[in-house]
Image: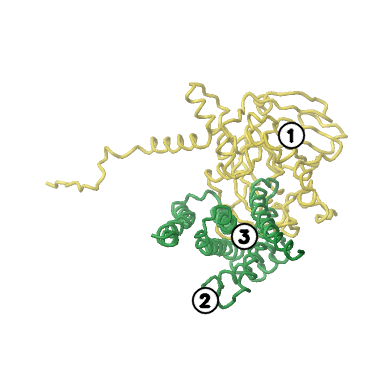
Amino acid sequence: MTATQRMMRVIKPIIFIVCLVPFAILVWDTFTHNLGANPVEKLNHRTGIWTLRFLLLTLTITPLRRLTGWNTLIRLRRMLGLYAFFYAVMHFLTWLVFDHFFNVHEIVKDIIKRPYITVGFSAFVMLIPLAVTSTKNWVRRLGSRWAKLHQLVYVIATGGVLHYLWLVKADVRDPVIYGSVLAVLLAYRVWYKRASLLPLTQVVRQ
Amino acid sequence: MLIKVKRRSEVSPSEITPQGLYLDRRRFLRLGAGSAVAAAALSSGFWDPAWAGVKLSKVLKGGPYNAKDELTPYESVTSYNNFYEFGTDKEDPARLAGSLKPRPWQVVVDGEVAKPGTFDIDDLIRPYALQERIYRLRCVEAWSMVIPWDGFPLSDLLKRFEPTSRAKYVRFETLYDPKQFPGQKRSVLDWPYVEGLRIDEAMNPLTLLAIGLYGEVLPNQDGAPLRLVVPWKYGFKSIKSIVKISLVEEMPLNTWAKTAPREYGFYANVNPHVDHPRWSQARERRIGDFFKRETLMFNGYADEVASLYTGMDLRRFF
């Protein structure tokens, strides 16, 4: 079995199932009344936190691949990104249904007036084109523009962290941890780009 | 002759747990879950009526201020708490409550009073007949509960110490002891927690000092052994585990107003028309409900308290 085959036939299916575990636990806790006194809040928080975790995991693939040379990792990236979208949809729905029960007026007011919702909602909306254009067909169709479009994920993840930071009352520890992980992941990209450009500019100067 | 053939699934009378025993068991479980202190007291063979979960005797019921709303279950009231002294998660207080020792407990009464002093909690509360008060509690985070408190009016206690004419405000302080309150090891807030009321708010008959809920001694996670309950204000005003009550001339700076002055004020009256800068206060989720309901002005206590704020701009004094 080649490395690619092992990835596609063994590792990826396993990771696929593992990524569903938080969802399974959520469903289990819902039906066993194990979500505490405020189940709606808990559903909302847990789906939100898993969205953020999957966004960060998605952003970890490229650095990890470059650092380890394990190139077939790239085959997990789309799946992780789509899981981020999956949890984001549920997060969005708990807000839409339980907080506002589809009351459009209230929803619009919330989005305009509340910075943490403005930024969270925008991040969610930006995720939609990324999920739609994640298929092979769209990758081919968009060509080099695909990579440009998907750089939006940096904005989305930053928005997600801000969304979290702006909603906590006083204890910013958790959002700061997520923010720091994101900062490291983004800083690596900046560093990598510079490092790879440097020889090139030297060549140009010569 | 009628011969009764017992089906395999049928329960024979001898297997049925007597109701009394069953209820005792429920109660025992509740005690166990609610308070590690109670469990520790049991195992050490020591029993004190001050421990959480113990029934309070002679509580007057059915006063004029009881809310008609459906009560929030005891389990929710004692498992979903904002009490940062234990931790910032809602489940932290119930999980970590065992470290707090509500006896022996001293309360200092000082400041602008004729008779200041330091009192043992039991001496402090002894003179007062306990009343049940079913109050709505509205958290600033837009959720709410309905809780049957057991306590006595703050005004009864204050009068006993004879406030002077310079007593314009009452300042309350929570115990500071990181050994008992593990959450105080982190400086999430500026410990000790401080709250305050204007003297007329403190003397309002709705303002309660609670030592119990659901007819039982306060569980630690709900602010044992002594807490304030101000039902027309956001929950953070109802300070828990009080060790100091001071009558003062100047408006005290309460902890949340100090932490985020743009977001939390001194008054913190429940007001659906004045939003928190980051979220709406127009609606709330009653614990146990899935959907939100409209928030009432002064949490539904406008008849009793609106006159305290006549002529005041409640947007400015939020």
Q: Nearer the viewer, mark 2 or mark 1?
A: 2
* Residue at x-position 68% and y-position 45%: A171
Q: CA distance from mark 3 to mark 1?
A: 33 Å
Query: What secondary structure is marked by label 1?
Result: strand
Q: Is residue B121 left or right of residue B96?
A: right
Residue B53, position as x, y percentages in the image: 53, 34
Seen from the viewer's position, the closer of residues B146 and B204 is B146
Q: Amino acid at mark 3?
A: Arg
The crowd level at tag 1 (other Cα within 10 Å; few <14, some 14-19, many 20+) is: many
- Single out the residue that lies furthest toward the top: B45
- Single out the residue that lies furthest toward the left: B1
Q: Nearer the viewer, mark 3 or mark 2?
A: 2
Tell me, yes or no, whether dots 3 and 1 are on the same chain.
yes
Quarter of the picture holding the N terminus of chain A: bottom left
Circle number at residue B173: 1
Q: Amino acid at mark 1?
A: Glu
Seen from the viewer's position, the closer of residues B112 and A168 is A168
Asked if residue A2 can be seen in this view, the reply is yes
The subunit letter for the residue under badge 2 reads A
Circle number at residue A137: 2
Tell me, yes or no, whether dots 3 and 2 are on the same chain.
no
Q: Quadrant of residue B252?
A: top right
The subunit letter for the residue under badge 3 reads B
Tell me, yes or no, whether dots 2 and 1 are on the same chain.
no
Residue B142, position as x, y percentages in the image: 65, 54
Quarter of the picture holding the C terminus of chain A: bottom right
> From what the image shows, is residue B93 above or below residue B244?
below
Query: What secondary structure is marked by label 2?
Result: helix
The shade of chain B is: yellow
Q: Amino acid at mark 2?
A: Asn
Q: Which residue is mark 3?
A: B293
